[in-house]
Amino acid sequence: MYVRLFTMTVIGLYTSRLVLEVLGVSDFGLFTVVGGVLAMFTFISGSLSKATARFLNTEMGSPEGNPNATFNICLLLHIALAFIVVLLAETLGLWYIGHKLNIADGKMDDALIVYHISIATACLGIVNSPYQSLFSAHERFGFLTALDIANSFVRLGCILLLSLYDGPYALRLYAVIYGLTTVNTFAVYHLYAHKYWHETIRLQYVRGWHRYREVLVFNNWNMLATMAYVARTSGTDLLINAFFGTKVNGAFAISKTVNTYVADFSTKFDAASAPQIIQAYAAGDKPRYTYLCNKLGRFTILLFELICFPILIELEFLLHVWLGQVPEGAVEFTFFNIIIGGVSVTCGGIYNLVNASGRIKWFKIEMSALLLLCLPLGYLLYSLGYPPISLLLLFIIADALARVIKLILMRRLLGFDSWQYAREAYVRPGIIALIMSVVLWAYTELGITAPLHRLCGIALCLLLTAALVWTIGMKQSERRKIVQIICKK
């Protein structure tokens, strides 16, 4: 997964620069905001995917589990969801784009074509979700890595060809390119699963409404949280569009791209542990899943620190190297989005354990309330003339408060030792964060401007962060274990 991450980060950053050059800031922002409209109708897919992953892992961890029945139940629910998405997107979504979206003159046809391609792409992704959960449950991360890297190269090649195009339909062609890679993924997933897990994916109709209801009840609470997250994400795009236009949308989209790659560096580690935590919980192995959660809580933060501080120390310079011409506001957006990402990774292992327990109701309610509260407050701030960045400050406060509440609920509802988790996960990374904050402040006081000196500053920051992670962030037994693993390799 880390091979995938490094490769796709390099390809993705270069691809994003090409796309920005080919489309321009305004069209890039238009593509983002149109996708935001569609995301309002596909939010259920994310929650149902989590429910599918949880029930598949539970069935595989249980001695008397039936993965085939669970797979068919989830597949039928995903197909039904795809039909609902098409219905909503082709009615309410079209009305919003035609009457409410702030689109430049002459761009409505482009927006509609991109929107319809996005609908088809989204529906394929929804139907493919149970297959993707099956791959994760079997921990076939090597295959997923190879497929994603291959798709990235295909997308890069197509965009390189698109850069040679000088016509008026670049945005439409980019949407087609984006959609074709989804079709490719859909086909490969189905062929591979049919070859290796034929009995699991063998189609059958599973009788008994209670089986579907069990998944849907779990999904409904997940859906509430997913809806709130998508509403915050897409609502941010729409609020920025309404008050500031597509150019600011483009700058904000760039910042989200950077944050995605930075956060992925640590969250992939957490994602890889999900099958083990859920299956350990299903087997009643409390020491195992407690150990995994506590370790993951610290390791995800350490991995985030390892990548974020070298970026923050020369953020503006790196954006100029990446993009050439940095849109106005992109530096500020990126800085605060990285901080938001830092807050979000302080729950490594927790979500997997909560999903494994099935007792997700109050976790999802508190999370959803804090996510949704930011939007009306953001609307109020924008109406009063505050800058675009003010909404991100609300997100940081809300996410930090959500983390505190989540740990309290873990202790009360699941009997989880939240104090032990906090000591294990936060103390060592917190010391590193304090030291590196002082280093970043001292570095800005030096006033370095030469490009070579800036690159040296980034390299030294990376080395210093890695040294602190190794000496302070990790325990002696963990360092010894890593050395043993490296020596065996």
Image (cartoon, rainbow, N blue to C red):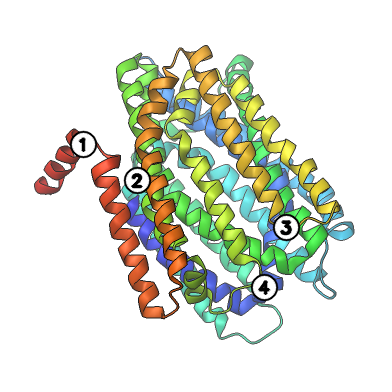
Quarter location, residue 115: bottom right
Mark 4 or 1, nearer chain start: 4
The residue indicated by pointer 4 is 25
Q: Amino acid at mark 4?
A: Val
- Alpha carbon distance from label 2 to label 1: 24 Å
Q: Residues within 10 Å of mark 4 (few under 14, many from 20)?
A: many
The answer to whether mark 4 and mark 1 are in CB contact below 8 A is no
- Alpha carbon distance from label 1 to label 3: 43 Å
Quarter location, residue 348: top left
Q: Amino acid at mark 1?
A: Glu
User: Of tags 4 and 1, which is closer to the observer?
Assistant: 1
View extreme (right): residue:
99
> Quick one: 19 or 324, which is closer to the camera?
324
Q: Which mark is residue 478?
A: 1
- Secondary structure type for disc 4: helix
User: Of tags 4 and 2, which is closer to the observer?
Assistant: 4
Is residue 327 in sight in this rendering? yes
User: Of tags 4 and 3, which is closer to the observer?
Assistant: 3
Mark 1 or 3, nearer chain start: 3
Mark 2 or 1, nearer chain start: 2
Mark 4 or 2, nearer chain start: 4
The residue indicated by pointer 2 is 141
Quarter location, residue 283: top left
The residue indicated by pointer 3 is 388
